[in-house]
Image: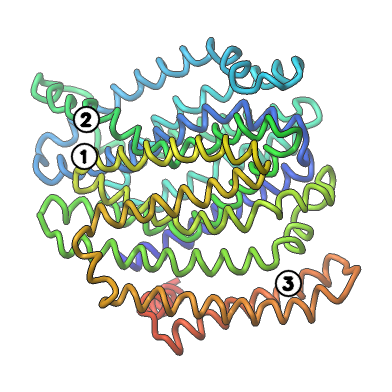
């Protein structure tokens, strides 16, 4: 399982690099402008629905398919085929209704935008609302792939929407403006569907739909409201940001948009492999009633995610200004844009560490059928973030939204840990978890000091620095941080997750 996770993580790294290049191109062509704000407002609710749909399938449909394939192998293919047809019908229905409601929704969300910008946003929103339909089909086909433990093709296909955006920006940005982003995304989704279908066509049979099969669908759709509620904390932030940041003036929403997309790219590098591979295994352990193995597997995954997401948070936060300057500052992305994005990045990355762990735990709750508690976590997260963002943004502006992000995710992580381990938490101070946290904090402090010293010598005291010179100096500073962290956590503290990953990556590199 761990080897598969590492291979998928390497593939997801390539996917994240494509998405990252996409962000560089957006920055160069559109910068942090009111037109990009209009795009972010237009896609915020469709992306909310896309996130809910993706979460629904990843968190709920995969365990359901695993259960049916394990318990009822003779009729699994008929069940899978029937469910596919149902989701196709739902996909068409959702986008058809949303297409007509899009202009009113834009007016409701961003009443302070100029009329011409609202019109531009409404046109993009109508195109964007076709994406949830495509994602519903894609997510189901991905779930079927994951059920039979085919992970590579879905991860590779994830690159098609950002590749579509890159292609349309390159060819049509001068004619379409920011609309090229939504057209490129939609094209990528449309291309993904046949590729995924071919890989699992034999898993679905479209005949012999008995009444018993239809009846087996009822529990799935009965649980959908709770499943969607559990996804809210992961998907609502774009919509909340569009509501509150758009009231703070031009470009503030763009700063958050760049920050969120960087966080997503970094998070995918750390967790996409464990997310995809862990879900069917957790579902199997839950079905078999192996609770101790279930918790042990989940705890190891969480410790590994926290370790490496904390490392990336430290490294990127310390070099954020020169790094954003080097990567983004060209074309329409100027110095003020660099400073704006840099101002929100440390807090969002710190929140990301907790967010990635919460995602794993919510997946675990779904895997063992605890949909009610998962829904409580999702609902609380959405309410807390909406309330804190609104209140703090009015008091201290953009940083108020960032602070709300941090508070929300770390509070949710504490709640999630209690839901899984409960009485065992009292003994954590005696366990390896306490030692893990203490060693991790010490390693981060020591690595951060070494990074800051090297940055003071190589970067901050030398100005101006041309791009090539800055690039290799940044590489040295970042290398100092990563090598010192791995040396301290693996060589001195002997943190098992670091040692395991190092050993695993060595085996993968040899096999490749």
Numbered tag placed on residue 243 in the rendering: none
Judged from this view, the residue extending furthest toward the front is 395
Tell whether label 3 touches label 1 (CB within 8 Å).
no
Residue sticking out furthest to the bottom: 492
Q: Which residue is mark 3?
A: 474
In the picture, which quadrant includes the C terminus? Answer: bottom left
Label 2, label 1: how far apart the Cα atoms are: 8 Å
| Label 2 neighbour load within 10 Å: few <14, some 14-19, many 20+ | some
Disc 1 to disc 3, C-alpha distance: 47 Å
Identify the element where label 2 is drawn. helix
Judged by depth in the image, the label closer to the viewer, 1 or 3, is 3
Q: Position of residue 428 (x, y in %)?
A: 27, 71
Residue drawn at 69 percent across, 27 percent down = 38
Name which residue lies at 79% across and 79% down.
Answer: 458
Q: Nearer the viewer, residue 54 or 242?
A: 242
Q: Position of residue 141 (x, y in %)?
A: 35, 37
Q: Quadrant of residue 61?
A: top left
Q: Residue at point 29% right, 65% down?
A: 299
- Pointer 1 residue: 64
* Of callouts 2 and 3, the N-terminal one: 2
User: Which is more N-terminal, label 1 or label 2?
Assistant: 1
Is residue 55 depicted above or below 413 in this figure? above
Which of the image's four quarters has the N terminus?
bottom left
- Left/right placement of residue 360 relative to residue 182 reads left
Q: Mark 1 and mark 2 in contact (Cβ < 8 Å)?
A: yes
In the rendered image of this protein, does residue 110 appear above or below residue 444? above
- Residue 7 visible to the viewer: yes
- The residue labelled by disc 2 is 220
Tell whether 478 sits left or right of 456.
left
Q: Earlier in the sequence, mark 1 or mark 3?
A: 1
Q: Say whether residue 347 is left or right of residue 423.
A: right
Label 1: how many Cα within 10 Å (few below 14, some 14–19, many 20+):
many
């Amino acid at each position: 399982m761990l080897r598969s996770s590492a291979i998928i993580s390497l593939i997801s790294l390539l996917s994240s690099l494509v998405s990252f290049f996409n962000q560089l191109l957006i920055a160069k062509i559109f910068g942090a402008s009111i037109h990009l704000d209009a795009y972010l407002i237009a896609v915020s609710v469709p992306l909310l629905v896309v996130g809910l749909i993706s979460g629904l399938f990843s968190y709920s449909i995969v365990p359901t398919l695993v259960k049916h394939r394990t318990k009822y192998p003779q009729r699994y293919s008929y069940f899978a085929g029937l469910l596919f047809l149902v989701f196709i019908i739902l996909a068409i229905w959702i986008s058809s209704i949303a297409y007509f409601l899009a202009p009113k929704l834009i007016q409701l969300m961003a009443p302070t935008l100029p009329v011409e910008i609202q019109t531009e946003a409404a046109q993009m929103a109508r195109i964007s609302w076709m994406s949830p339909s495509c994602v519903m089909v894609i997510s189901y086909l991905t779930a079927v792939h994951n059920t039979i433990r085919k992970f590579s093709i879905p991860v590779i296909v994830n690159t098609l929407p950002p590749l579509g955006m890159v292609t349309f920006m390159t060819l049509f940005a001068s004619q379409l403006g920011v609309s090229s982003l939504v057209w490129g995304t939609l094209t990528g989704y449309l291309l993904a569907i046949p590729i995924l279908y071919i890989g699992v066509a034999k898993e679905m049979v479209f005949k012999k739909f008995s009444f018993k099969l239809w009846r087996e669908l009822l529990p799935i759709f009965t649980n959908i409201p709770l499943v969607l509620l559990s996804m809210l904390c992961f998907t609502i932030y774009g919509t909340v940001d569009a509501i509150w940041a758009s009231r703070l003036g031009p470009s503030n929403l763009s700063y958050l948009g760049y920050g969120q997309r960087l966080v997503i790219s970094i998070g995918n590098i750390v967790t996409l492999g464990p997310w995809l591979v862990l879900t069917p295994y957790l579902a199997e352990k839950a079905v078999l009633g192996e609770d101790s193995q279930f918790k042990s597997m989940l705890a190891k995954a969480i410790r590994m995610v926290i370790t490496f997401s904390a490392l990336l948070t430290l490294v990127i936060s310390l070099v954020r200004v020169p790094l954003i300057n080097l990567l983004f500052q060209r074309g329409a992305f100027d110095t003020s844009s660099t400073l704006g994005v840099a101002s929100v990045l440390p807090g969002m990355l710190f929140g990301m560490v907790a967010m990635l762990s919460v995602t794993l735990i919510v997946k675990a709750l779904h895997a063992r059928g605890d949909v009610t508690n998962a829904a409580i976590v999702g609902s609380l997260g959405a309410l807390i973030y909406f309330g804190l963002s609104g209140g703090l943004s009015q008091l201290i502006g953009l940083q108020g939204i960032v602070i709300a992000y941090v508070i929300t995710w770390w509070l949710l992580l504490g709640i999630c840990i209690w839901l899984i381990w409960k009485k065992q938490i009292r003994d954590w101070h005696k366990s390896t978890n306490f030692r893990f946290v203490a060693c991790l904090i010490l390693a981060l402090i020591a690595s951060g000091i070494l990074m800051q010293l090297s940055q003071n010598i190589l970067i901050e005291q030398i100005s101006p620095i041309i791009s090539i010179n800055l690039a290799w100096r940044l590489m040295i500073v970042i290398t100092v941080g990563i090598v010192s962290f791995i040396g301290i956590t693996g060589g001195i503290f002997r943190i098992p997750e670091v040692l395991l990953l190092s050993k695993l990556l060595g085996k993968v590199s040899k096999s490749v």
